[in-house]
Image: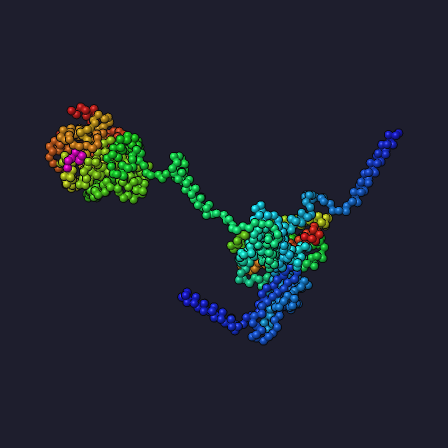
Amino acid sequence: SRTKTQSTEQCLLLVVLLVSNMLLTKEGVTSLPICPNGSVNCQVSLGELFDRAVKLSHYIHFLSSEIFNEFDERYAQGRGFITKAVNGCHTSSLTTPEDKEQAQQIHHEDLLNLILGVLRSWNDPLIHLASEVQRIKEAPDTILWKAVEIEEQNKRLLEGMEKIVGRVHPGEIGNDAYSQWEGLPSLQLADEDSRLFAFYNLLHCLRRDSHKIDNYLKLLKCRLIHDSNC
Amino acid sequence: MDLRHLLFTLALVCANDSLSASDDLLRWPQISKCRSPELETFSCYWTDGNFYNLTAPGRIQLLYMKRNDEDWKECPDYITAGENSCYFNTSYTSIWIPYCVKLANKDEVFDEKCFSVDEIVLPDPPVHLNWTLLNTSQTGIHGDIQVRWDPPPTADVQKGWITLEYELQYKEVNETKWKELEPRISTMVPLYSLKMGRDYEIRVRSRQRTSEKFGEFSEILYVSFSQAGIEFVHCAEEIEFPWFLVVIFGACGLAVTVILILLSKQPRLKMLIFPPVPVPKIKGIDPDLLKKGKLDEVNSILASHDNYKTQLYNDDLWVEFIELDIEDPDEKNRVSDTDRLLSEDHLKSHSCLGAKDDDSGRASCCEPDIPETDFSASDTCDAISDVDQFKKVTEKEEDLLCLDRKDNDESLPSLANTDTQRVLMNTQSENSQLWPPFADSIDSASPSVHTQLSNQNSLANTDFYAQVSDITPAGSVVLSPGQKSKVGRAQCEGCAEQNFTMDNTYFCEADVKKCIAVTSHEEDEPYVQEQSCTEDAYFTTESLTTTGVNFGASTAETPSSEIPVPDYTSIHIVHSPQGLVLNATALPVPDKEFNMSCGYVSADQLNKIMP
């Protein structure tokens, strides 16, 4: 009978331990899980992801500046494009912070979603840019190559941003707000002047938006990872 | 005209300058630049021009308009940025929004500019430059320092709103040119290998990371090692790398190496570096011989090479390449081939043995001393050695035709051993002296030759190509009319030294007899070369008979024209490679004594005939 009691006690202890363990682990979800379900790179930290994202956004902005300068040099001289380039970009419908105060006040999740929105809005135009720029008469190889590269890197940045958003705010994919691009017909106009102006406009908008995304990401990185002390 | 244009433009420029200097010309106000130092505010600056002095003093205004605005607004702050400037603080500044500013007074617009703030970023210069010594070299001459600075205070780098990169420039105090380093993001930079005895100046400037334009330079930082109280060594003079010595020594070494290679006995090394230039060569013949023109020796060498014999004859050539000159009947009335040939050869007397100017291109291949002839087969130098034989041979033939030109001591005899199937009819009807190598005076023979030719011109009406007259080096057999007697080549010239014991040779009986006769008469005839009747000689009946007659009687006799020419058209024996034996078709033989219609006797029979 003694062994019976002993064994019963042991069983009970085990049960208590199990239950307490279950209860404890259930309530202990205070910190972010390092590896949420479905994630592949468990070992990559958020800081590392931000570093990569910033590098990519910087590279995309660098390429956009260069392609715009080259296009300007080669096709826009003497056509008076500059004075006309106050046209809006298709991403103007997205309300993004327009100066530092606004950017500091916006919540980082919203900012991340906005970044995602802008990146998604550029998915389609970049694909068409890469293909239509090849139809330009005697387009230099550097322009062609850069257009393709920007399109690729933008895709990678979009993936990276989605990963970051999944880390920072798991469960919410964020609103799918992005602005549709309707500018494809203008890139295919028969009149060469109009068509070149459409390209000029698109590249100008691309440079601007890539600078915006670069700035927002650097701001977020300093804020989230380095605690506003870059 | 260009000079006039140039002078005109120069005059215009001069006038412009003088006018502008005198303030008579109106200069319009212009917006010089718009700049944002930190991506939060921006300012625009303009120049006045001389507007105020000349026209009604209306106030110049700067108006701006954002993209979404409907109307032009006036500048909010004319003061903060200085004179002729407009300052937009953070509340008026929106990044990534297109602005347009214009300079105007009430009546007219002077200048207009459109931009967005992110495009006009020019940061302020960095501040608080300082340096620290990292280490010194063991000799104490050079040292490394680390330079640090702070980003411009206006730029909010900490929050990451703007990212800057910096460019450092430094130079020695008494130098004029600044040395630049690559732009970098970090605010500290090491400078290596500075000379401790010298003082340096350092300055830094910054720009937004993806822009091209830099902002202003910072204040200059003076680096002086003596002030820091560091021990160093004065170097009076600098030792620069002795490039001059390196060049000299390198050239000397190279020269010495080349000389060693040249002098070395190692042929392989020599061949590797100085490959030998190929020169045309004939096997077994010293090129010097050819150069000196000693053809006799060359001929002897060539003649003594038996292997050339076999190379000359291919089995197929006899059958395949028999060229028949088929002419128009009209032409036959005119000059016949032989005459033409002979006359041509006579005309060509000047170029018999000399080097021919052949355009065939082979002249580049061969030494010019070697006389060239028409060789259809030999297009390369390689074949030359083989066909040199032919060359020499044919040269001899032509030479014979140039009877008035040379003594033929050296020319003829090389045919002896060459076995060429060349058949030139040599027999002359009249003169026994026409056997050139035997003849003492060939010169005298030539006139008779001509007379012979002229005589025969009239006689010949038809050309029966029934006689092998020549063999080209290619191996083609050239047939020629039978009754023409060709001047020149004497068959069996070396009758005195004929070797009738050779097999496979067919001789005319008359020929043999003739030889015998000749031998008896002219024994002391000098022979340069050994000759033998090993050549297959083909004579027509007529020539032989005439020869025979001549020999016997030694009287000139014009050949009878009525003697019909036998047509040698059927091949009796193909005796390759020595030749063909053609059968004579049956002909009415006028005289009995000519019945020995050149029966071709074999060597055995010949022996019987010979005494």
Write down the quadrant of residue B130 in the picture: bottom right
The spot of residue A86 in percent (x, y) is 61, 62
Using the rendered image of the protein, determine whether residue B364 is visible from the camera's viewpoint. Answer: yes
Which region is colored magenta?
Answer: B436-441
Is residue B437 part of the magenta span, yes or no?
A: yes
Q: Is residue B186 left or right of residue A171?
A: left
The spot of residue B519 in percent (x, y) is 15, 29
Residue at horizontal 26%, vertical 32%?
B301
Using the rendered image of the protein, determine whether residue B461 is visible from the camera's viewpoint. Answer: no
Q: In this view, does B605 lie above or below B564?
A: above
Q: Which of B355 and B86 is in front in this view?
A: B86
Q: Which of B42 and B508 is in front in this view?
A: B42
Residue at horizontal 79%, vertical 45%?
A27
Residue that protrudes farthest toward the bottom in the picture: B56
Q: Is residue A223 above or below residue B517?
A: below
Location of the N terminus of chain B (image quadrant):
bottom left
Write down the quadrant of residue B116 in the picture: bottom right
The spot of residue B452 in percent (x, y) is 15, 39
Q: In this view, does B28 lie to the left or right of A25?
A: left
